[in-house]
Image (cartoon, rainbow, N blue to C red):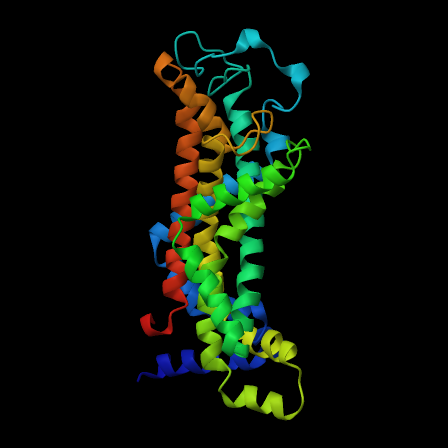
């Protein structure tokens, strides 16, 4: 090795020694030195998916600030503006870049607010499914016996039904129970509960499998010996070891939850037309598709497809990045 190379290594080592220990071992420094960031930056497809996701989510969150029109404000709407084509089409209006729908609402503004509604429903449903599935999976794997058999047989029964059918069934049951009440305002939570209860099985089965392995390890046996309660052992000691697979499932299920919400809204059991979501916009636009008003369904459909694809790509990357066998 040359003297110059030796000098550079010595200088680099001295600079590392000069850095405070807290700086070298800070969470931010560990993140920039991690394999996770390296695998993220070396894939252009994953970076593009992250940028698309950030763009769509950011635009949805900033909808009240950047939307040209508030679709919830009926005073700003006019039926005379209904079915206006995009601004570059013949008969278009420069005020409505992507055209208007059947109620005279700006498609761009409605799409921004609708994406926010779809994202909020998807995130809340995934959070509900994660909490329920992780809790039941930990309980089944740690307790074993009849508890394990009962939870897993219930999961097996639910797996025989498609998730959309389960969500439709739960939605119908809730509407039947609260038939004497006006549910337009509570439709958001009906969708969250319906979709969340349709996706808890994957979490429960995955967490249960990991828990069956972890409960026989030395650190769990040591926790039992010092008298820790089963709940504390499950949530403080076993749970951190199952969060990797749970995070991957939650990322992939976010796209599925958004698509499920759009499907339910398209079938007419989702959000009402006065509270737009991507599925509601596609349902409304589908009525006018053959009359030539293609923009009502094309732009919300494209946004839904791009968002679902980007989130799925991020979920696939996260699954591979957290898999130690692929490193």
Residue 154 on image: x %, y %: 48, 61
Q: Is residue 81 above or below residue 284?
A: above
Position of 229 with respect to 47 (left or right) is right
Q: Nearer the viewer, residue 170 or 279?
A: 170
Determine the residue positioned at 46% across, 55% down: 251
Q: Is residue 189 left or right of residue 168?
A: right
Residue at 51 percent across and 29 percent down: it is 111
Give the left or right position of residue 244, taking residue 75 as reference: left
Q: Name the residue nearer the viewer: 210 or 174.
A: 174
| Closest to the observer, 308 or 109 | 308
Rendered position, 246 above or below 297: below
Q: Is residue 101 visible?
A: yes
Can residue 41 be seen by looking at this rendering?
no
Which quadrant would the C terminus be assigned to in this image?
A: bottom left
Q: State the residue at coordinates (55%, 78%).
A: 143
Q: Position of residue 302 (x, y in %)?
A: 39, 33
Quarter the N terminus occupies: bottom left
Dividing the picture into quadrants, the one containing residue 164 is top left
In the depicted structure, whether residue 235 falls above or below residue 160:
below
x and y, in percent, of residue 68 in the image: 59, 23
Total label count?
0
Residue 104 lies, in percent from the top left, at 55, 14
Q: Nearer the viewer, residue 24 or 317?
A: 317
């Amino acid at each position: 090795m040359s003297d110059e190379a030796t000098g550079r290594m010595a200088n680099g080592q001295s600079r590392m020694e000069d850095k405070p220990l807290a700086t070298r071992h800070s969470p931010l420094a560990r993140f920039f030195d991690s394999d996770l960031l390296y695998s993220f930056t070396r894939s252009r497809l994953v970076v593009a998916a992250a940028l698309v996701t950030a763009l769509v989510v950011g635009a949805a969150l900033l909808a009240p600030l950047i939307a040209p029109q508030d679709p919830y404000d009926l005073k700003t709407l006019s039926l005379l503006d209904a079915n206006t084509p995009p601004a570059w089409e013949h008969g278009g209006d420069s005020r409505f870049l992507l055209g208007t729908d059947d109620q005279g609402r700006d498609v761009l503004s409605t799409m921004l607010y609708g994406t926010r509604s779809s994202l909020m429903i998807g995130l809340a449903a995934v959070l509900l499914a994660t909490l329920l599935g992780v809790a039941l999976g930990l309980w089944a794997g740690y307790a074993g016996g009849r508890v394990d058999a009962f939870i897993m047989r219930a999961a097996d029964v639910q797996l025989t039904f498609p998730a959309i059918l389960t969500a439709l069934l739960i939605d119908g049951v809730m509407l039947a129970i609260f038939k004497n009440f006006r549910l337009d305002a509570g439709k958001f939570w009906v969708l969250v509960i319906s979709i969340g209860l349709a996706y808890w099985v994957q979490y429960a089965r995955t967490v249960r499998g990991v828990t069956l392995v972890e409960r026989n390890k030395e650190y769990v046996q040591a926790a039992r010996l010092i008298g820790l309660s089963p709940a504390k052992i499950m949530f403080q000691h076993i749970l951190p070891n199952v969060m990797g697979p749970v995070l991957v499932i939650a990322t992939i299920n976010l796209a599925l939850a958004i698509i499920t919400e759009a499907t339910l809204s398209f079938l007419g059991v989702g959000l009402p037309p006065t509270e737009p979501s991507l599925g509601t916009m596609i349902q409304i636009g589908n009525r006018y598709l053959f009359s030539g008003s293609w923009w009502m369904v094309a732009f919300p459909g494209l946004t839904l497809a791009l968002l679902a694809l980007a989130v799925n790509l991020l979920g696939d990357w996260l699954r591979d990045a957290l898999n130690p066998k692929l490193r």
